[in-house]
Image: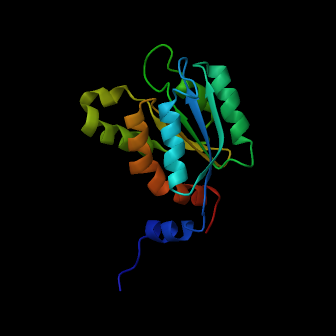
């Protein structure tokens, strides 16, 4: 009988995490709750996989407002993971990286690399303009995604949802 790889063993054990409590932050100067299609998509996809969205907010493209919101969620016992959407590009108003990345204790470099690789298959060389990233802060998983619905769907379906329970289980230090 072949020995299972450790990631397979961990993923099996991580199924003990039944539901991840998520906070979703839309970063935009123009979106409202009615027009926040990417934030709504993220919420729907998370809930369809049995996770709960315990916090949701829209904030303007302002480093300090974004940071204040994310820090409040990183210190909230009701939150296991934070997902932001928007403001990850290279325009002057795109500030998610500057607001959130300094809060990370550890970076998940593979997330950004894989996301841009998958994006390249869909949008070509424009994928290089994405600064999407992920990491761990205060024992919680953090993902910062672009504002496009297609990009959010790609990230959730191909990367985040398949590993979310496993990531939370691992960050909690489960053995």
> Hey, which residue is sitting farthest top in the picture?
92
Specify whether 21 is left or right of 50.
right
> Hey, which residue is sitting farthest bottom in the picture?
1
Q: Taking 40 as reference, is 64 above or below it?
A: above
From the image, which quarter does the N terminus lie in? bottom left
Q: Nearer the viewer, residue 24 or 125?
A: 24
Where residue 163 sits: x, y (%)? Answer: 48, 56
Specify whether 91 is left or right of 39.
left
The color scheme shown is rainbow
For the point 43% across and 20% down, which residue is it? 90
> Hey, which residue is sitting farthest front in the picture?
34
Q: Taking 80 as reference, is 55 above or below it?
A: above
Where residue 4 sits: x, y (%)? Answer: 41, 75
For the point 46% across and 69% down, which residue is it? 6
Q: Nearer the viewer, residue 171 or 76?
A: 76
Say whether residue 107 is visible: no
For the point 48% across and 72% down, which residue is it? 9
Q: Nearer the viewer, residue 106 or 114?
A: 114
Say whether residue 159 is visible: yes
Specify whether 122 is left or right of 161.
left
Where residue 167 sits: x, y (%)? Answer: 54, 55
From the image, which quarter does the C terminus lie in? bottom right
Q: Where is residue 62, by image quadrant?
A: top right
Q: Taking 113 as reference, is 96 above or below it?
A: above
Where residue 28 sits: x, y (%)? Answer: 54, 22
For the point 61% across and 54% down, which residue is it? 20
Specify whether 36 is left or right of 129.
right
């Amino acid at each position: 009988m072949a020995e299972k790889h450790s990631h397979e063993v961990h993923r099996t054990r991580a199924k003990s995490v039944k539901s991840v409590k998520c906070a979703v932050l839309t970063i935009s100067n123009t979106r409202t709750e009615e027009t926040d299609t990417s934030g709504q998509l993220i919420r729907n996809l998370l809930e369809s996989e049995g996770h709960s969205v315990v916090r949701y907010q829209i904030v303007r493209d302002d480093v300090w407002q974004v940071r204040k919101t994310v820090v409040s969620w990183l210190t909230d016992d009701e939150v296991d993971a934070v997902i932001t959407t928007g403001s990850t590009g290279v325009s002057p108003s795109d500030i998610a990286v500057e607001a959130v990345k300094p809060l990370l204790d550890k970076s998940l470099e593979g997330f950004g690399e894989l996301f841009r690789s998958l994006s390249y298959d869909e949008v070509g060389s424009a994928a290089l303009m994405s600064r999407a990233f992920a990491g761990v802060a205060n024992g919680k998983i953090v993902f910062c995604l672009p504002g496009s619905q297609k990009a959010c769907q790609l990230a959730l379906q191909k990367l985040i949802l398949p590993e979310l329970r496993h990531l939370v289980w691992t960050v909690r230090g489960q053995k």
